[in-house]
Amino acid sequence: MQDFARTQTTAAADAAKLAALRRIKALATSMLVLCLAVFLAARSFEADVPALAYVAAFAEAAMIGGLADWYAVVALFKRPLGLPIPHTAIIPSNQERIADNLGYFIEANFLAPEPVRRKLREVERRNAEHDRRAVSRRDQALRRDARRQAEQASAERRRASRGAGPRD
């Protein structure tokens, strides 16, 4: 029963991620089309308003940047437009090598004895400092409380010596 519920939860999470991905893709495509429209409009009225050359240049740069980003991301995972362009589908074709290097990196930098010892010493120093501060705060609170009680006792003795009696 738990496996069925977990599968449903995973399927729902996957569906939500896919919907979010589609929304982002639609937004990115819309922004690219908007940049194209701004570019074309600025170019068509550039003769009348020379300052629109700057707007056209910015829109052109935005389109080129958007296309370059799209290509770079797609090229990491697959072949853009299905074309056998060199140096594309980098992650799938090098998945095993990447996994081996990542495993080595984790082993060497996080699981080797010396980095673990360093991290433990750092945690121990932090805990010791925290403990010192906690003891210091507790000592200060005890001193304040003792001072207050001593002042109250002194006041009670003064009242008693004057015949006023203890305070209720």
Image: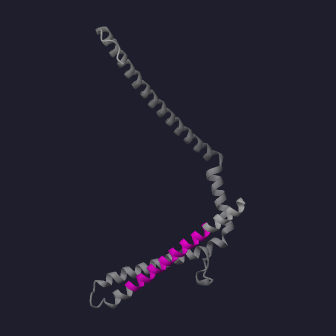
Q: Please indicate whether residue 73 sits to the left or right of residue 30 in the image.
A: right
The image quarter in which residue 11 lies: bottom right
* Image point (66%, 58%), residue name: 103
> In the picture shown, does residue 161 fall above or below 128?
above
Q: Please indicate whether residue 12 sits to the left or right of residue 127 in the image.
A: right
Q: Is residue 31 magenta?
A: yes
The image quarter in which residue 73 lies: bottom right
* Image point (63%, 71%), residue name: 91
Q: Position of residue 5 (x, y in %)?
A: 68, 62
- Counting labels gives 0
* Image point (60%, 82%), residue name: 85
Q: Position of residue 88 (x, y in %)?
A: 60, 77
Segment colored magenta: 13-38
Q: Position of residue 137 (x, y in %)?
A: 44, 31
* Image point (66%, 70%), residue name: 94
Q: Closest to the observer: 29 or 166?
A: 166
The image quarter in which residue 160 lies: top left
Q: Please indicate whether residue 93 sits to the left or right of residue 65 in the image.
A: right
Q: Is residue 103 magenta?
A: no
Q: Closest to the observer: 109 or 30?
A: 30
